[in-house]
Every structure is written in structure tokens, then in C-alpha cells.
């Protein structure tokens, strides 16, 4: 006689959903980092220009 242990199907589906949510969260984090990297230089340049105008006016 061989003992077989089966993983309950509802737990298996829950584990798959958890992995999908983690992958989605990782994708969102990568997109946010890419957006910040792409926009960061432009925002920094605008703030530097604004600071120099304010300094020159004062």
C-alpha cells in the first residue's frame, strides 16, 4: 500500500493567485521606476531653471 498525499485544490489556486499578484506588483514597480528615471531628468532641469530665475530676480 502506497501513501499518497494530495494538495488541496483550493490551496493550489490560492497559491497561483498569490504568484500572479506578486508578478503584477513587480511589473508596476518596474514601470514606476522607469517613469521616474525618464521624467526625473526633465523635472530636475525645470527646477534648476526655476531656481536660477528666482535667484537672479532676487
Image (cartoon, rainbow, N blue to C red):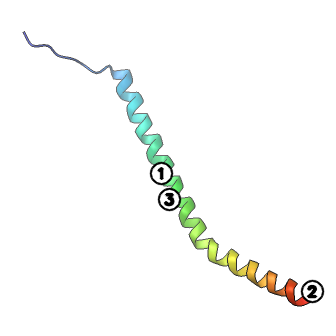
Q: Earlier in the sequence, mark 3 or mark 2?
A: 3
Question: Which quarter of the image is occupied by the C terminus?
Answer: bottom right
Q: Earlier in the sequence, mark 2 or mark 1?
A: 1
Quadrant in the rendering for residue 53: bottom right
Could you tell whether 33 is left or right of 10 in the image?
A: right
- 10 Å neighbourhood of mark 2: few (<14), some, or many (≥20)? few
What residue is pinned by disc 2? Answer: 58
Q: Nearer the viewer, residue 47 or 13?
A: 47
User: Which residue occupies 87% across, 90% down?
Assistant: 56
Q: Position of residue 12 (x, y in %)?
A: 35, 27
Where disc 3 sits, the SS reads helix
Residue that badge 3 annotates: 30
Determine which residue is flagged by label 1: 26
As drawn, the residue found furthest toward the bottom would be: 56
Mark 3 crowdedness (10 Å alpha carbons): few <14, some 14-19, many ≥20: few
Do the CB atoms of the residues marked 1 and 3 lie less than 8 Å apart? yes
Q: Nearer the viewer, mark 2 or mark 1?
A: 2
Answer whether labels 2 and 1 touch (C-beta < 8 Å): no
Left or right: 54, with 47 as reference point: right
Q: CA distance from mark 1 to mark 3?
A: 6 Å
Q: Horizontally, is 17 left or right of 52 in the view? A: left
Where, by quadrant of the figure, is residue 49 drawn?
A: bottom right
**Residue located 53% across and 55% down the image:** 29
* Alpha carbon distance from label 2 to label 1: 46 Å
Element type at mark 2: loop
* Screen quadrant of the N terminus: top left
Q: Residue at x 33, y 22 (%)?
A: 9
Percent position (x, y) of residue 36? 60, 66
Amino acid at each position: 500500500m502506497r501513501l499518497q498525499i494530495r494538495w488541496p485544490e483550493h490551496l493550489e489556486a490560492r497559491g497561483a493567485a498569490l504568484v500572479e499578484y506578486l508578478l503584477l506588483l513587480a511589473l508596476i514597480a518596474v514601470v514606476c521606476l522607469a517613469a521616474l528615471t525618464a521624467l526625473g531628468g526633465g523635472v530636475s532641469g525645470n527646477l534648476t531653471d526655476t531656481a536660477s530665475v528666482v535667484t537672479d530676480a532676487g
